């Protein structure tokens, strides 16, 4: 019961806010303000589940109190035995709901529902690393297809044998960031490269960065801080693939951040996408600063929260994929590379939630 006493003030305030939103949305004066109605509907949707859980919790708790009151009144032993059994079941059900309510109160990542920009870069391993980067791009593309999301390439540097030195692409879909954000990090592959004549197993790497796609209003960029270069898009081997210069490179002078896009045939579209990438990178820098300040405070309270730099290993000889952050291994590697990522992503989300719960108890 101590847990619920800690949560009650927050839950009651949330229910009060929910009721206030309901009143405002029913008000005729509000109904004519489309933007206001949209904002209220979005806020209501974000808290509706927790409020419903809280109301159900109170119903179960009231049933438990009524059953305990019957036990105190006495009665024959058979009735008392039934009441005790019911009370035990209700108490177990009620106590199990407390953790769900606590999870519901955890702060949500405001970017979870956003589209994302994914950057995959070949690391150590030469041509094999570039081929692995192409495998990862295909894996995320197939994962997006499984969820009915749309992908669009923004920029790429292909190699002559079908790999990518780097590739940047957008993923458009509800909840894309919430599902893909933990994919950031170092990915390793262990296999015999197609370029290896002796049959030796090599370890190659690629890095993945997942950025939420940011609106103009979220990140203000001063146009005077930008240098915009227009150049010819290039294909395999660097040859020009278009006679008209349409590729765009934007340099943010204060930070030195460079964002390029060349995969669209329109200069305007390339510029728009390059700006989207620039905003996402600037937003990530600011977000990291804020997170570092918070994490320093948390480390002082709960000890180090740092985790291994290892990300995920794709081991072909053993047909195994291991995510070192959650110590989870799954087999059927080819299916994972074909986009069957949900088990790994679910484990990473559960781990994030468990850590947030632990921090909320401090």
Image (spheres, rainbow, N blue to C red):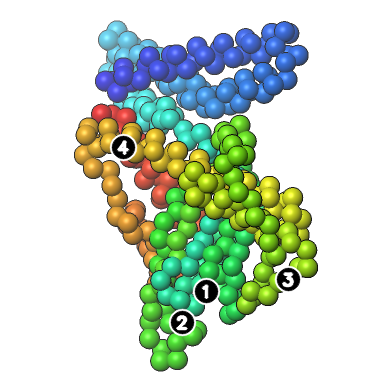
**Above or below: residue 120 compared with residue 40:** below
Tell me the residue that label 4 is attached to.
295
Nearer the observer, 166 or 335: 166
Q: What element carries label 3?
A: loop
Q: Residue under circle 1?
A: 131
- The residue lying toward the viewer, choosing from 307 and 148, is 307
At 78% from the left and 68% from the top, the residue drawn is 243
Residue, disc 2: 193
Is the C-beta separation of discs 3 and 2 under 8 Å? no
Task: Judge from the rendering whether residue 78 lies leftward or rightward of residue 262; answer left or right.
Answer: left
Residue 349: percent from the left, percent from the top?
43, 45
Label 4: which secondary element: helix
Disc 3 designates what residue?
A: 241
Asked if the residue at tag 1 contacts the one at tag 3, i.e. Cβ–Cβ closer than 8 Å, the answer is no
User: What separation in Å lies between label 2 and label 1 (alpha carbons)?
Assistant: 9 Å
In front: label 3 or label 2: 3
Relative to 7, residue 342 above or below: below
Kindly report the distance in space between the C-alpha atoms of the residues bearing marks 4 and 1.
36 Å
Earlier in the chain: of badge 4 and badge 3, it is: 3
Q: Which residue is drawn at 34% across and 53% down?
A: 326
Spatial distance from mark 3 to mark 1, Cα to Cα?
22 Å
């Amino acid at each position: 019961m101590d847990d619920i006493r800690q949560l009650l003030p927050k839950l009651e305030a949330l229910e009060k806010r929910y009721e206030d939103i309901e009143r405002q949305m029913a008000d005729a004066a509000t109904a004519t303000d489309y933007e206001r109605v949209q904002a209220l509907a979005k806020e209501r949707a974000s808290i509706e589940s927790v409020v419903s859980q809280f109301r159900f919790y109170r119903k179960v708790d009231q049933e438990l109190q009524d059953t305990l009151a019957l036990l105190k009144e006495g009665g024959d032993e058979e009735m008392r035995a039934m009441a005790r059994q019911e009370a035990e079941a209700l108490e177990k059900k009620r106590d199990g709901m407390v953790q769900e309510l606590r999870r519901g109160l955890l702060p949500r990542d405001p970017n979870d529902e956003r589209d994302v920009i994914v950057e995959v870069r070949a690391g150590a391993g030469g041509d094999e690393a570039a081929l692995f980067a192409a495998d990862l791009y295909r894996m995320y593309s197939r994962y997006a297809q499984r969820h009915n999301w749309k992908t669009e390439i923004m920029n790429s540097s292909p190699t002559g044998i079908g790999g990518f030195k780097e590739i940047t692409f957008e993923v458009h879909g509800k909840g894309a960031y919430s599902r893909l954000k933990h994919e950031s990090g170092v990915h390793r592959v262990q296999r015999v490269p197609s370029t290896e004549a002796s049959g030796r197993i090599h370890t190659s790497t690629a890095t993945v960065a997942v950025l939420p796609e940011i609106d103009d209003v979220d990140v203000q960029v001063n146009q005077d801080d930008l240098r915009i270069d227009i150049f010819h898009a290039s294909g395999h081997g660097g040859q020009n693939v278009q006679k008209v210069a349409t590729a765009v490179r934007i340099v943010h002078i204060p930070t030195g951040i460079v964002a390029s896009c060349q995969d669209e045939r329109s200069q305007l579209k390339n510029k728009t996408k390059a700006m989207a990438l620039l905003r996402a990178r600037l937003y990530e820098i600011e977000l990291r600063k804020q997170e570092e300040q918070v994490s320093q405070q948390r480390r002082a309270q709960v000890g180090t929260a740092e985790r291994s730099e290892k990300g995920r290993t794709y081991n072909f000889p053993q047909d195994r994929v291991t995510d070192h952050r959650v110590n989870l291994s799954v087999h059927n590697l080819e299916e994972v590379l074909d986009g069957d990522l949900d088990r790994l992503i679910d484990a990473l989300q559960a781990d994030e939630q468990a850590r947030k719960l632990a921090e909320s108890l401090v």
